[in-house]
Every structure is written in structure tokens, then in C-alpha cells.
């Protein structure tokens, strides 16, 4: 697209002058969530070298933002965004079609001039959109992006009638017969994090993405978007889940259950309580998160089928690559 006909300009994000307008824009955008706010991204501190950009129209109004940083694992790579589950171009309802192409085309040119060799673009799945938009997908195709990966995520339609397996019904009934209780609140975060770290290490030889200090900080920053739900027998913590509210979707970020909890249906009870909370929050979707094994990058079929057993369907997480 000729420079003389450009409708927009892209400028580097300035944390001194753009932070408030960035976050205000994300809240009103088509496809942004709190994960794209500077309030969220800045909790990483200096871990990432930021290369985010702000897009303005001819009269200086913000019409799109592009959260991005230098990739820590791949040399010469810019990623949108390495500190968030999703990234890509966050835009408002006025930016559509070839305008999206123009903006991403400008960003590609800027990153090329900065010396980067490729751009990793982590698309926001449509269930997290305020208004469903696929303009970015069209632009990526037009600009020669290749689809780098597709991850399956089980996703529950909150308003639809669910077909739940016999195993799930039995586990929930077991939890009720054992008189397990559910608690919503952050007072038990420290105990829960001990359980989460232990179960991830013992069963999967892995660690939470967030440290204990980071999740405590995020809970303080986003009390209306991040929740902890735990299930108990007397004074014993058996299971718990951490949930992120992203527009009309309640997303399962972490889940952990003790050996005793597995035998008593504790996880099912916490999840059923979360489905009810999603209804109370007027959510359209409950997302279980993808089921890709980080060690092999292949589908963990057992985990995926477990999530689907609650009556869930599926969506995809798509990551694209543009050669610069």
C-alpha cells in the first residue's frame, strides 16, 4: 500500500505517555482482554524487551495497539506477546478489512527495519472477543503468514444443555456424598500454590507459569478478573482452580487436586461451582485451556478427553509466523 494513501500511523509505545490511553483502548476494543493491558503486561517488569506499538488515525485517535516484545527463546524474533497467552493486533470496530492489512503491513516493515527476522503472531481466539472479528486472520493470509501451530482447547457453551459422561456424574455425586465444601476467595492462595507446585512437579515434571509472588500481585491488580476456587473436606484442602475472566469467557488457568481429592471427586465439585459462577457473571463460555503437552507439543488425549467429558466442545489456539 502506498505511503501517500496510509490512513494510519504506527508509533512505539511509551510507558510514560501511553499507558492510560492504551488500557482504556483495550477495554473498548473488539478483541482485547485484560491480558493485553499494560497493567497486566507490566507485572513482568524488565523480563521482556518491549517492542509494542500504538496505531493512530489521521486525527491522532488510537485505533489499534500491538503488544509485542523480543522473544526470549528465538534469536531475531519478535512475538506478540511472549508474556501473554494471546497477542496480535488489538483493534476497535472502526478498523476493518484492508485497514487491518495496512496496519499489520506497516508493523512488518517497522520490525524488518529494526533488524528482526520473523514475527510470531498469537491470535486471540474468538470466544475472548467483545465483538467477533476475523479481519486479522484475513490480513495474515494476505501478507504471507504461515500457520505455525494449532492447539485444541475444550470449551463449554454456558447457555447450552450439556451432555455429561457417566464418569463426571459419578464424581460429582461422590463429592456431594463426602460432604465436600467449596470456597471462593483468595485467603487460601498460599496453601493452594503449595498443592499446585507439588502436583505439577510430581505428575508432570513441570512448574506453574506464574510464580507465587506473581500470582499474588495479579490477584491484587485484578480482583474482578482473577478468582480462586477451592474444595475442602473439613480443614483439608483437596482441590482448587484459578480462573481468569476475559470478557464473556471464564478461563481455567490452573487446576490442581491432591491424591485424596481425586478419590473424592473434589475437582469435579470445584469445576461445577465454576460453571455456576460463569452463569452468574453472564459469561457465554467456559474455556478449559489447551491440552498440548509442552514437552512433546502433541495433544494430551487423556487430558483433552477429560475436559470434553463435562459436555464441552472445542476451539483452537492458532499461532502464525511472518518472515521479515
Image (tube, rainbow, N blue to C red):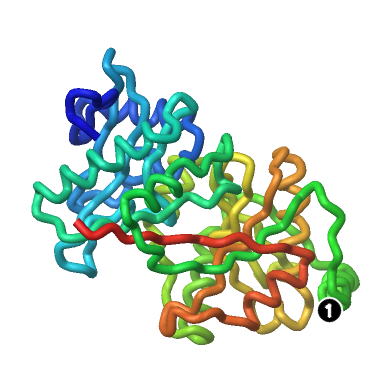
- The residue beneath circle 1 is 167
Task: Point out the image quarter for the N terminus.
Answer: top left
Q: Which is more toward the observer, 198 or 129?
A: 129
Residue lying at 49% horizontally and 79% vertically, measured from the top left:
293
Vertical relation: 321 (above or below) 134: below
Spot occupied by residue 34 in the image (x, y as percentages of width and height) = 46, 41
Residue shown at the point (34%, 46%) measured from the top left: 41
Q: Residues within 10 Å of mark 1 (few under 14, many from 20)?
A: few
Question: Which part of the image, by quadrant, shows the C terminus?
Answer: bottom left
Residue depicted at 28% across the width and 30% down the height: 55
Disc 1 on helix, strand or loop? helix
Above or below residue 120? Residue 11 is above
**Rendered view: 145 above or below 14:** below
Task: Evaluate whether residue 47 shows in this view.
Answer: no
Side of 220 relative to 162 (left or right): left
Taking depth in this image into account, of 36 and 184 the one nearest to the observer is: 36
**Left or right of 175 in this view: 227:** left
Q: How many marks?
A: 1
Amino acid at each position: 500500500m502506498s505511503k501517500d494513501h496510509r490512513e494510519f500511523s504506527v508509533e512505539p509505545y511509551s510507558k510514560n505517555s501511553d499507558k492510560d490511553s492504551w488500557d482504556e483502548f483495550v477495554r473498548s476494543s473488539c478483541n482485547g482482554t485484560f491480558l493485553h493491558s499494560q497493567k497486566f503486561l507490566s507485572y513482568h517488569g524488565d523480563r521482556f524487551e518491549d517492542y509494542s506499538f500504538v496505531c493512530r488515525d489521521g486525527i491522532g485517535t488510537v485505533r489499534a495497539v500491538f503488544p509485542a516484545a523480543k522473544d526470549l527463546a528465538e534469536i531475531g524474533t519478535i512475538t506478540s506477546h511472549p508474556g501473554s497467552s494471546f497477542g496480535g493486533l488489538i483493534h476497535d470496530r472502526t478498523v476493518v478489512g484492508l485497514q487491518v492489512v495496512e496496519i499489520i503491513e506497516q508493523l512488518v516493515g517497522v520490525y524488518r527495519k529494526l533488524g528482526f527476522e520473523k514475527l510470531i503472531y498469537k491470535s486471540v481466539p474468538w470466544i475472548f472477543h467483545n465483538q467477533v472479528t476475523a479481519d486479522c486472520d484475513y490480513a495474515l493470509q494476505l501478507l504471507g503468514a504461515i500457520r505455525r501451530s494449532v492447539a485444541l482447547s475444550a470449551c463449554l457453551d454456558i447457555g447450552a444443555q450439556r451432555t455429561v459422561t457417566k464418569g463426571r456424574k459419578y464424581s460429582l455425586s461422590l463429592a456431594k456424598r463426602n460432604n465436600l465444601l467449596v470456597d471462593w476467595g483468595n485467603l487460601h492462595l498460599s496453601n493452594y500454590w503449595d498443592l499446585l507446585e507439588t502436583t505439577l512437579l510430581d505428575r508432570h515434571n513441570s512448574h506453574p507459569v506464574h510464580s507465587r509472588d506473581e500470582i499474588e500481585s495479579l490477584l491484587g491488580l485484578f480482583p474482578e478478573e482473577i478468582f480462586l476456587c477451592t474444595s475442602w473436606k473439613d480443614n483439608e484442602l483437596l482441590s482448587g482452580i484459578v480462573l481468569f475472566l476475559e470478557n464473556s469467557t471464564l478461563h481455567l488457568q490452573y487446576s490442581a487436586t491432591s491424591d485424596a481429592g481425586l478419590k473424592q471427586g473434589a475437582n469435579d465439585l470445584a469445576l461445577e461451582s465454576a460453571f455456576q459462577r460463569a452463569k452468574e457473571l453472564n459469561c457465554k463460555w467456559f474455556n478449559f485451556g489447551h491440552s498440548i503437552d509442552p514437552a512433546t507439543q502433541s495433544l494430551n488425549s487423556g487430558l483433552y478427553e477429560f475436559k470434553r467429558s463435562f459436555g464441552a466442545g472445542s476451539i483452537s489456539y492458532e499461532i502464525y509466523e511472518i518472515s521479515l
